[in-house]
């Protein structure tokens, strides 16, 4: 009886359920990410006040500690920054900016990297050599340095005022442009591997056009790798934005991202106002961690050799 | 200090093969020797952000050059701590008439070269200053110098000029015999050169050689990096308490490194102190931090040409009532600025204690309503951002002002730029509100008006930094009148009246005077030799010798 029941429970539905239950880490990361990103997305409704509305700012309330410490003000649960702005509101709005830049930059990287990678891999020859040497040159510089150079060129070409207005878009552009080789390399490698296989040969013999072969046959085979990289890259892009803002090359003071918030608090760390730097710092770390673990869990999920249930049913 | 360390190191290398005991005994010996050498040899190590690149004190007009001039030369008169004037090489002075000032000079003073100092050196030095590209504008009022006798000299001006004594703080008499004649052909082109030649960034006699009357002689000079000085044995001022025998100055451009060098004991005195290090240095054991209300005013200029609303006095006043200078000083820049409501700092002729910050939001709102702007308007603001220099966090100040003006419905679209980019934008008057910092290089109130409020006139150069585009001929003529008034009491009341007119008319929003900060090891009695002109008189500084420290090493 008992053995029969256990046999019955290993049907396809229960199997999936058990599989999902074993992906607790995936769920945990997803939950954390949804919580942090959701809070950021819903900032206009969740935040105690609008940090972009300067008329609400009271300089006299500056540097108040979080609610559980002495000297705090009601209505500012996480304290205030040097200008007297509510830190919780700043963090939520700042996370919005950071996430927008993170996702935006990765989208741009994907677009550039996949297009150029497919081109290089499929065409090969001179175009491939040219694109890959370009990628080599770019990879030889650190991302941050590339970003600083591109930022400086944009600033010099269009002026600081322009930079201030289109800060978010420019940061997306800068981080996007400086990290595309990673995608291009990956895509090119899988295209090179795939294109010698029979089914591509078959497609070619059948007279399909090159774009069709590339988009319908090659691209889908590179997707799993791309998704995995993207998890890490979003975290990377958020960190790059934070680093640029920390160096003073990011967004203006009126629209702080998490990175520029950390930077603005840094000067007051020694005078005891730790919350301006540490709380946005914690938010940033948790967000990046959640995104990274999510990417990691996804990779495990997609990896056929590490699917424990599917393998265990076949046993030894 | 560093030399003796290197010496010890060499000893160690020589005797490495020998036994332990011998080595340690020898080291002890070396330590004892260097300690006795140091006891009668008081040293002082100083780190500044920049040092002069030439020994010619007329080549460039910078604070660094003037600091060096105070070490190797003596001025005729100098500023004391309360912005009064203290006799140096001039012992007394009298006004012969509206255009002539007679100076009586100190007798028995010798230059480092051994030449005696006389009135001819003063005349020669002023003539050279009038040829210096950097100084000639300041010395334009002096038309002639006459030598009455060896110890008396008359300064003549074209028209009545009340600030002759202020000018005399820039006259550091040079050794005219030492600096006269032809220099042997050393340059590649084989041309001989006048020893008195002034060439900016050039290789001249004066840029490599020095002979002044000052407390120190330069013994080693690395342009822009390091200056070593030794006390001049024949210095005239026996009343000076100064006891430093060897003075060494290094340039450490990075402010965090400068602070670290002081904390580590590598140097004994640093200037400037960055704002971010203030609280740290205040609590550091063995370190004295000294701050003083400075003389550099920071203000926001309201461009009347760009914004019609700024032509209405009520709007400008409303903005002045809306900005809370005290809150900025207290919350944003604590201990680093003194809130201001006028241009002249305390101690200046035009300073009036009655003119205080006037924060009053209700009044500001009422004035905006009266002026017909109950819903405000939009303006742009630009300020330098000194992220890397970190002297005063002007970007934070600009943001705070934007928030304060938002309360009277003036929406400020503000941008901050690095300093070098900022000034080109400033010259273009690129925003409606521009941040400006200014200090008077004559040590006098009139200078503020001439540059910041006078009607702009490109021919005479007045109002060059008047980005308010404000023009009040009545104010200009009042200040011009004060500039030819040699009776100091009457002049003072005129300048005060001028400050009061500006206060009432509000062409700009004054914010604060930036405080000055220095830090020194507590064995250096630095405070008595500091002044708001930021020129420490290190010839007079008293240093407790480093006696016990060698044993602990």
Image (cartoon, coloured by chain):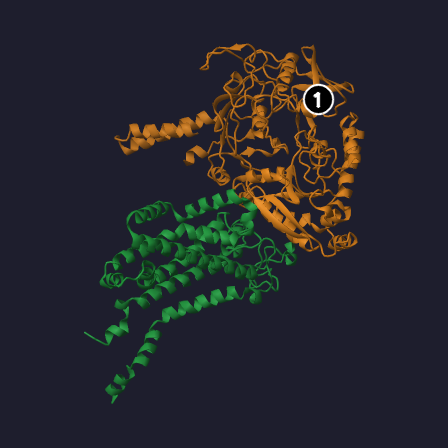
Residue A5 placement: quadrant: bottom left
Residue B149 placement: quadrant: top right
Is there any visible trace of residue B492 in the rendered image? no
Mark 1 neighbour class, 10 Å CA radius: few under 14, some 14 to 19, many 20 or more: many
The colour applied to the residues of chain A in this rendering is green
Front position in the image: A316 or B176: A316
Front position in the image: B541 or B194: B194
Residue A145's spot in the image, x, y percent?
42, 45
Q: Above or below — where is B123 with respect to B261?
A: above
Which quadrant of the figure contains the N terminus of chain B?
top left
What residue is pinned by disc 1? B141
The colour applied to the residues of chain B in this rendering is orange
Q: Which element type, helix, strand or loop, lies under badge 1?
A: loop
Residue B421's spot in the image, x, y percent?
56, 39
- Residue that appears at 41% across and 68% down: A30
Marker count (numbered)? 1
Residue A235's spot in the image, x, y percent?
41, 58
Residue A311's spot in the image, x, y percent?
24, 73
Residue A228 placement: quadrant: bottom left
């Amino acid at each position: 009886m008992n053995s029969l029941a256990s046999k019955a429970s290993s049907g396809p539905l229960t199997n999936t359920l058990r599989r999902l239950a074993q992906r607790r880490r995936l769920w945990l990361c997803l939950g954390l990410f949804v919580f942090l990103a959701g809070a950021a997305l819903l900032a206009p409704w969740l935040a105690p006040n609008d940090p972009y509305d300067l008329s609400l700012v009271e300089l006299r309330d500056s540097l108040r500690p979080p609610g559980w410490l002495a000297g705090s003000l009601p209505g500012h649960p996480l304290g205030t920054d040097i200008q007297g702005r509510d830190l919780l509101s700043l963090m939520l709005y700042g996370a919005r900016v950071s996430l927008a830049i993170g996702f935006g930059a990765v989208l741009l990287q994907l677009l550039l990297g996949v297009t150029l990678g497919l081109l290089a891999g499929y065409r090969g020859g001179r175009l491939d050599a040219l694109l890959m040497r370009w990628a080599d040159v770019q990879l030889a510089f650190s991302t941050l340095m590339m970003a600083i150079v591109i930022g400086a060129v944009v600033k010099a070409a269009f002026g600081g005022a322009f930079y201030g207005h289109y800060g978010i878009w420019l940061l997306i552009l800068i981080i996007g442009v400086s990290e595309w080789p990673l995608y291009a390399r990956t895509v090119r490698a899988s295209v090179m591997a795939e294109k010698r296989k029979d089914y591509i040969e078959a497609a070619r013999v059948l007279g399909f056009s090159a774009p069709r072969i590339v988009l319908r046959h090659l691209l889908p085979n590179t997707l799993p790798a791309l998704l995995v990289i993207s998890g890490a890259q979003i975290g990377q892009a958020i960190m790059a934005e934070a680093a640029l803002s920390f160096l003073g090359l990011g967004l203006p003071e009126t629209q702080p991202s998490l990175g520029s918030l950390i930077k603005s608090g840094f000067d007051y760390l020694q005078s005891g106002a730790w919350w301006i730097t540490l709380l946005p710092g914690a938010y940033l770390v948790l967000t990046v961690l959640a995104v990274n673990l999510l990417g990691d869990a996804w990779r495990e999920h997609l990896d056929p050799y590490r699917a424990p249930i599917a393998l265990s049913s076949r046993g030894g | 200090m560093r030399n003796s360390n290197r010496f010890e190191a060499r000893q160690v290398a020589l005797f490495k093969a020998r036994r332990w005991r011998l080595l340690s005994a020898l080291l002890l010996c070396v330590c004892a020797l260097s300690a006795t050498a140091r006891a009668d040899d008081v040293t002082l190590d100083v780190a500044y952000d920049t040092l002069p690149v030439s020994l010619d004190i007329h080549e460039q007009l910078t604070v660094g050059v003037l600091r060096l001039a105070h070490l190797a030369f003596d001025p005729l008169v100098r500023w004391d701590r309360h912005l009064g004037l203290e006799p140096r090489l001039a012992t007394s002075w009298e006004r012969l008439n509206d255009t002539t000032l007679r100076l009586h000079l100190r007798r028995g003073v010798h230059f480092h070269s051994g030449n005696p100092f006389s009135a001819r050196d003063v005349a020669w030095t002023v003539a050279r200053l009038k040829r210096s590209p950097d100084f000639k504008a300041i010395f334009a009022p002096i038309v002639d110098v006459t030598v009455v006798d060896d110890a008396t000299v008359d300064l003549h001006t074209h028209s009545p000029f009340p600030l002759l004594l202020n000018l005399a703080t820039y006259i550091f008499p040079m050794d005219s015999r030492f600096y006269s004649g032809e220099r042997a052909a050393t340059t590649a082109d084989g041309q001989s050169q006048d020893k008195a030649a002034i060439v900016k960034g050039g290789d001249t006699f004066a840029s490599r050689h020095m002979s002044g009357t000052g407390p120190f002689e330069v013994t080693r000079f690395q342009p822009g990096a390091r200056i070593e000085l030794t006390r001049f044995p024949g210095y005239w001022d026996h009343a000076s308490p100064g006891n430093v025998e060897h003075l060494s100055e290094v340039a450490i451009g990075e402010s965090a490194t400068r602070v670290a060098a002081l904390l580590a004991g590598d140097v004994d005195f640093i200037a400037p102190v960055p704002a971010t290090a203030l609280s740290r240095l205040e609590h550091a054991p063995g370190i004295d931090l000294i701050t003083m209300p400075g003389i550099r005013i920071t203000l926001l200029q309201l461009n009347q040409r760009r914004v019609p609303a700024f032509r209405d006095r009520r709007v400008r006043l409303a903005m002045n009532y809306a900005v809370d200078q005290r809150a900025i000083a207290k919350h944003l820049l604590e201990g680093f600025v003194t809130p201001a409501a006028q241009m002249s700092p305390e101690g200046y002729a035009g300073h009036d204690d009655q003119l205080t910050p006037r924060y009053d939001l209700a009044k500001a709102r009422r004035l905006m309503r009266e002026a017909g702007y109950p819903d405000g308007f939009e303006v742009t603001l630009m300020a330098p951002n000194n992220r890397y220099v970190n002297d005063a966090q002007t970007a934070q100040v600009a943001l705070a002002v934007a928030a304060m003006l938002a309360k009277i419905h003036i929406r400020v679209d503000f941008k901050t730029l690095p300093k070098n980019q900022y000034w080109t934008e400033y010259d273009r008057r690129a925003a409606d509100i521009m941040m400006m910092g200014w200090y008077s290089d004559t040590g006098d109130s009139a200078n503020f008006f001439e540059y910041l409020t006078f009607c702009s006139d490109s021919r005479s150069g007045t109002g060059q930094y008047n980005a308010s585009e404000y023009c009040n001929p009545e104010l200009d003529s009042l200040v011009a009148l004060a500039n030819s008034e040699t009776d100091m009491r009457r002049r003072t009341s005129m300048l005060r009246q001028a400050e009061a007119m500006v206060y009432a008319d509000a062409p700009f929003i004054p914010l604060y005077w930036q405080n000055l900060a220095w830090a020194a090891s507590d064995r250096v009695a630095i405070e008595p030799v500091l002044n708001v002109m930021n020129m420490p008189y290190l010839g007079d500084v008293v240093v407790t010798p480093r006696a016990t420290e060698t044993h602990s090493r």
